[in-house]
Amino acid sequence: MGDQAIERKELIEALVDALHSDDKHHAAYAAGRIRDLVIPSSPDARANQDAIGAQEGCLEGLVNLVTYGSDEGTFAACHALAQLAWSNARNSFRIPAIPSTLDALARAMRNEGGQEAVREYACITVGNCGANSVEGAKLIARHERLMLALTSAITLPSPPVAPGGAGPGSRMRETATLALKNCAASSDEAAFIIAEQKGVLSALKV
């Protein structure tokens, strides 16, 4: 293992420890640092994606923050998960395969009083996982509460916005639509389950 790989491993291990800290500020900071390491513009983003996804306790720590973190930590965790799944087949399966992930994302998406950015990044995480992993798409489609959250986002009326505007509801509708289409494109089983959801076919215009 080269010096750079050793440094990466040590940094990730330290961040994982912080993710599981009782101090919510420290946990939120760690989630933000993980996000910064894997955004596409970050140096070595792909290697960081792989190393972070494989690090024991890291994905679980992020998922835990989605549910139990501070507002800052919940946002950073959702954003980090979305970036970890971006164009990465392994992470796109690992993330939904964690037993608590899909429940956590469904709750985040249906939290009407919560941060709109959290709802959107939870949805983006689902879409990225569905796009890059056949098995991930199947897990998503089989999860009833997550399907309800996605279909509600595209079938329920959005709050009115000013002419020419794009309110939070419309952005969420677009993100959820893309997530469902990604899952359907990856897996015939997922496509069948999605098509069975009330109102989805007309909302997706397929």
Image (spheres, rainbow, N blue to C red):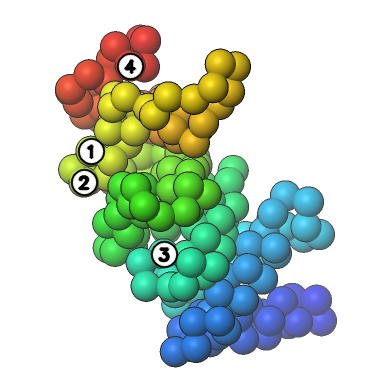
Do tag 2 and tag 3 residues touch (Cβ < 8 Å)? no
Do tag 1 and tag 2 residues touch (Cβ < 8 Å)? yes
**139 and 15: which one is in front?**
15
State the separation of the CA atoms marked 2 and 4. Answer: 19 Å
Give how far across and how far down residue 89 sits, in percent: 51, 47
Q: Say few, some or many: other residues with alpha carbon within 10 Å of mark 4 (under 14 / 14 to 19 / 20 or more).
A: some
Three-letter residue code for mark 1: Leu
Image quadrant holding the C terminus, namely top left
Q: Say few, some or many: other residues with alpha carbon within 10 Å of mark 3 (under 14 / 14 to 19 / 20 or more).
A: many
State the separation of the CA atoms marked 1 and 2. Answer: 5 Å
Do tag 1 and tag 3 residues touch (Cβ < 8 Å)? no
Image quadrant holding the N terminus, namely bottom right
Do tag 3 and tag 4 residues touch (Cβ < 8 Å)? no
- Give the quarter of the image for residue 43: bottom right
Give how far across and how far down residue 167 sits, in percent: 51, 31
**In the rendered image, is residue 75 in sight?**
yes
Do tag 2 and tag 4 residues touch (Cβ < 8 Å)? no
Give how far across and how far down residue 79 sits, in percent: 56, 56
State the residue position of label 3: 66
Q: Secondary structure at mark 3?
A: helix
State the residue position of label 4: 203
Q: Secondary structure at mark 2?
A: helix
State the residue position of label 2: 145
Q: Mark 4 or 1 closer to N-term?
A: 1
Q: Mark 2 or 4 closer to N-term?
A: 2
Q: Secondary structure at mark 4?
A: helix
Q: Residue at x 36, y 17 (%)?
A: 204
- Give the quarter of the image for residue 107: bottom left
Q: Which mark is residue 148?
A: 1
State the separation of the CA atoms marked 3 and 4. Answer: 28 Å
